[in-house]
Amino acid sequence: MKLPVLLALLCTLCCSSAMAQPGKLCSGDAGLRKLEAYWSSTLFLGLLDKHGDWTAAMQAADSQHIALSIKNGQIKQNLAWHEGDESKYCLRLQGDKVWLLDEKGKGKGPELGPYQRLGTLDQREADLYLARLIQGCFISAEKEQWCFQKGRLSINGQPVNARLELDLSELDLYGTPLHVQGRKLPFWYLVKRSDGWAVFEDDYASKENRKPVNPETSKPWRVLRPQ
């Protein structure tokens, strides 16, 4: 084979190989603008679908590494939604998923992921997760209509200032906790049952004189059945 032909062939192979390599972006790179969103571990989303319960899914995963947010050129881990993340990261891109690399992509630790896009930054992250756990309308024994649509709750057609509590560090570990504004007991815990949902009122786990709730034996505050 003549030298010019050989060189052309080698160039073609090298270029094809380079094009096939997944891309990498790091904190501060302009290319991150196209990735700005909330991202969630594919494994964790599978656990949410499997358990139908926020606490159970969080306990079954490494909650420090299940979600990312990409905003203003920065990549942040959720760290169980309990503390801020000031580290610098890189991402490996492949298809519609990303993998998290250690600081500056130096290869000092294992890749984390894959992560998939959960939703846009103009949405509430808590709403995006709650929408994966419960959707539709339910009727309570008190004839109230509870409707969950896109992670938002309304009762009898009136919006309720309630959101999924992502951070479980100060809560008792059961069910799916909603933080509700303007109530003496600030949490409604949703516990999935075969015929609907049980709702328990509860407080922070460390609250003095708190009456512990056992979702197996305690009487629910509300029982919701599909409409």
Image (cartoon, rainbow, N blue to C red):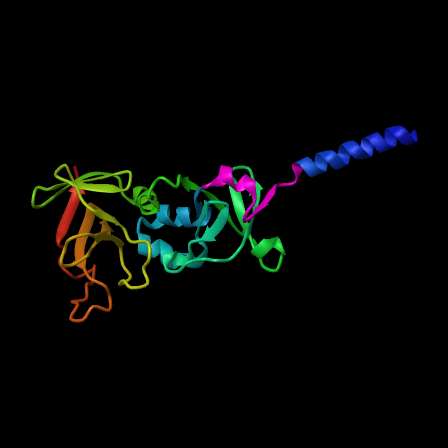
Quadrant where the N terminus is found in the figure? top right
Residue 78 is covered by the magenta coloring = no
- Residue 167 visible in the snapshot: yes
Instruction: State which quadrant residue 29 falls in.
Output: top right
> In the image, which residues are magenta?
20-36
Residue, x 49% and y 49% (percent of image)?
Answer: 75
Quadrant where the C terminus is found in the figure? top left
Front residue (pair 202, 217): 202
Vertical position of residue 55 compared to residue 3: above or below: below
In the rendered image, the residue lying farthest to the left is 142
Front residue (pair 67, 26): 26
Give how far across and how far down residue 18 sits, in percent.
Answer: 70, 38
- Residue 190 visible in the snapshot: no
Residue, x 27% and y 59% (percent of image)?
Answer: 174
Give how far across and how far down residue 110 sits, in percent.
Answer: 57, 57
Residue, x 30% and y 42% (percent of image)?
Answer: 131
In the rendered image, the residue lying farthest to the right is 2
Instruction: State which quadrant residue 95 falls in.
Output: top right
Left-right relation of 138 to 121: left
Left-right relation of 16 to 152: right
Residue, x 21% and y 59% (percent of image)?
Answer: 215
Left-right relation of 17 to 95: right
Badge count: 0
Give how far across and how far down residue 63 sits, in percent.
Answer: 41, 57
